Image (spheres, helix red, strand yellow):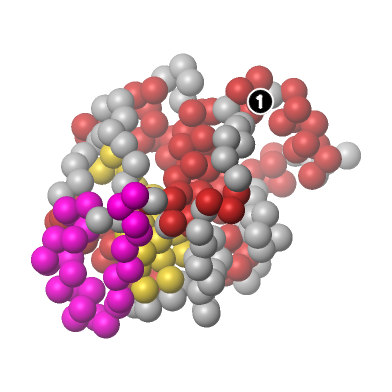
Amino acid sequence: MQQDARKHVRKCDKCQRHADMILAPPKELKTQSAPWPFSWWGMDIPGPFTDGLHQCRFLIVGVDYFTKWVEAEAIPNISAETILRFFKKNILARFGIPQVVVTDNGTQITNKNFQEFLAAIKTKQHFTSVEHPQTNGQAESANRLVLRGRKRRLEEGKNKWVEELWSVLWAYRTTPHSTTGETPFRLTYGTETVIPVEVEELTW
């Protein structure tokens, strides 16, 4: 299956044109080690993009430092209320209370309500440097992968990026990570998922 995938990528025009271009040494992305799954999360908000479904123009992305699992959601605005709702629904309710959340210094992230909520659940908030936002290396890397997947799928229909976000996340979660050698799905659930190609066709 891996050989088939490599052959497909070599022949795929979009895969080649939207692949990562190494413009800076990898060491500039500072990463932290998490002591256990879902204890450290990085959060970031790329955008604005072309208006999508429900006037969504931004993404909010959260990545677990241990498993590399990514949660992402299309949002119409970047208000503090929207960010807190994402945190409660996509991180807290699914994976429990984190020990640390790493964010930038955006006003919606430094909002009093968001900080008071984190304090109430005893979650520490670490901030990236204003001059060097790449210090949140996990979130920066996740953003790059999600946005690259978005470009590949939406080259001809940019306004449908919201509807296709699920497939970008699925591809990321079921692809082995270069750091761990495992898929985020396996590290999260302890088993591999059944991917569409295993259902629809055989690999010879």
Residue at point 25% right, 43% down?
75
- Disc 1 residue type? Gln
Mark 1, residue position: 16
* Disc 1 crowd, CA 10 A, few/some/many (<14, 14-19, 20+): few
Question: Can you see residue 93?
Answer: no
174 is higher (above) or lower (below) than 34: above
Q: Quadrant of the N terminus?
A: top right
Please identify the quarter of the rendering in which residue 41 is found.
bottom left
- Residue interval drawn in magenta: 106-131
Q: As drawn, which residue projects farthest toward the top?
A: 156
Q: As drawn, which residue projects farthest toward the front?
A: 131
Along the line of sight, the residue nearer the viewer: 202 or 74: 74
Question: Can you see residue 100?
Answer: yes
Along the line of sight, the residue nearer the viewer: 137 or 86: 137
Residue 9: x and y in percent read: 72, 31
186 is higher (above) or lower (below) than 171: below
Q: Is residue 126 left or right of residue 27?
A: left
Residue 58: x and y in percent read: 29, 39
Residue at point 46% right, 17% down?
156
108 is higher (above) or lower (below) than 147: below
Does 66 lie within the magenta span? no
Along the line of sight, the residue nearer the viewer: 13 or 100: 100
Residue at point 52% right, 79% down?
36
